[in-house]
Amino acid sequence: MLPDKSQFTVLIVDDDDEIRYSLGRVLGSQGYSIVPAGSGEEAIEKIKSGLSPDLVFMDIRMGGITGIETLQHMRSLDSNLQIILMTAFGTAQTAIEAMKFGAHDYIMKPFDVDKVLGLAEAAISAANDLKTADSYEVKVNSEDYKDGIVGNSPAMQEVFKIIGQVAASDATVLITGESGTGKELIANCIYKHSLRSGGPFVAVNCAAIPDNLIESELFGHEKGAFTGATTQRIGKFEQCDRGTIFLDEIGDMALATQTKILRAVQSGEIQRVGGTETITVNVRLIAATNKDLEKMVEEKTFREDLYYRLNVFRIKLPSLVERREDIQDIVDYMLQSLLKERKAKAKKVTADAMNALVSYDWPGNVRELGNVVYHSAVVAQGDTILLKDLPSTILQAVGSIGGAAPAVSPTVESAQAVDVEKPRFDPYAVTSKPAKPVVAEVQEKVSAVESILPQPQTFVRSLPETYDFLYGELKEQKKKRILSLIEKEMIERAIEDTGGNQARAAEILGITRNTLKKRLDEYAGR
């Protein structure tokens, strides 16, 4: 819950006097300071004159400039301003434009007041976070991480040391680690720092190529070697002669192909599919897998001799959970990269959002973190990622949400749907009487009338005009009339007790609002 809400200012922009009044009453009853404006031009002028609202509720269709145009102007004055647009026309265009130009949210008219209050509190919380939350200090210079590998943790320092040891050699390297830990980045880094950096670097995902095609992909094929082989094809090993080939997910490779890989590693010789010529290639091999190759060797699903050929130097990448201290630097690097590529505008993260990122367990490792950062940077409305901008899966996992919806008082179902008549009524007036289905209570009243017939005034004290009728003519055929009178009294009582709030009165009576309006129309016509 927010602290004293009176310290937060809500600007309500709508050219409909009744909407401004009703919405102002709803939000004002919660303690917010309300400032009305009858047009987009007036709202902009108020902000230029020094008004600094924490939240803006604004209609999209107004006389003069539209809500979307006003939103764009307001955002140019304050990129962190929280704006909720209101509309009676829920088209796709409306939703897309509202979010595209940086609205915190938008809400349909007639709107549910509980939802209005929930949105208001969420937006005010976001505004408060931007004012009060310290963003973490930017420490990373993207130029220091040209290889794209970020991390100062002890685990990553060990990885860097091994890269330095093997880079200048032609030794085969096996990179292991969970999916998403950045194995291809490490392979690319080894290549860039190697003596072969002037040659080609070719990456092949073995798991993505069907078994019947991988041999052709790696070693090429001759024309006519199989159905569909209409031309000669040069394979990946030939393409990266004097360079480096990276075989990712090598644990998914079929045994038959493993045999040919072994020959290529041992002798530097290959044959195209369907060919008889032996081709010599000079290729450095780097392989990677997220599987347990030792176990696969025991199970005879991976060749032991190939395993030893690959495992000359081994680099085991830690999971992201094993190097949580690197998360802040990784996030900062990712944001700088997105900013440079103009994919998003956010460039910093609030401390509570960063704490949530650090606390999460990251089953998808750095790859998942990259997706989350991109998502959050796009969703963020200003230059700062707030806690609310993180995906709900992250917030739920770290316990940052749950019970987040503010507790609100029972209110009218819609600020626009309120039947506003003079004198004005308080939309927060509620009855203390229990909600009981109207039919059940009417039946109880009928029984009460029959039992207290000698002194009916104890029940009908508020309906003196019906006293004689009830006292003198209570008969079986008149019960329908009695029911109608009792129902009328109950409806009038509910309307009175709720200060004229028809939605709340209907809820208490146990009937729909449409039924209530129908009954009131009937009474008015009598």
Image (cartoon, rainbow, N blue to C red):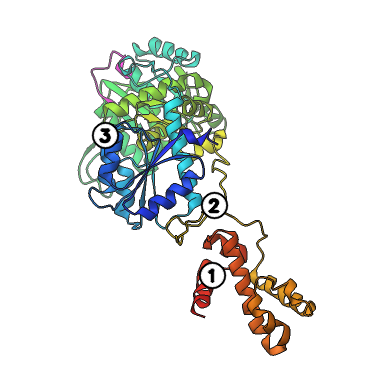
N-term-proximal mark, 3 vs 1: 3
199 left or right, relative to 456:
left
Q: Is residue 516 in view?
A: yes
In the rendering, which numbered label is found on residue 76? 3
274, 9: nearer the viewer: 9
Q: Amino acid at mark 2?
A: Tyr
Q: Disc 1 to disc 2, how far (Cα)? A: 19 Å
Residue at the image point whose x is 66% and y is 56% from the top:
432
Foreground disc of the pair 2, 3:
2
Which residue lies under the disc numbered 2?
428
Name the residue rendered at 55%, 58% in the picture.
Answer: 499
Image mark count:
3
As for residue 200 lying within the magenta part, the answer is yes
| Mark 2 Cα shell of 10 Å, populated few (<14), some (14-19), many (≥20) | some
User: Could you tell me which secondary element the residue under label 2 belongs to?
Assistant: loop
Does dot 3 land on a helix, a strand or a loop? helix
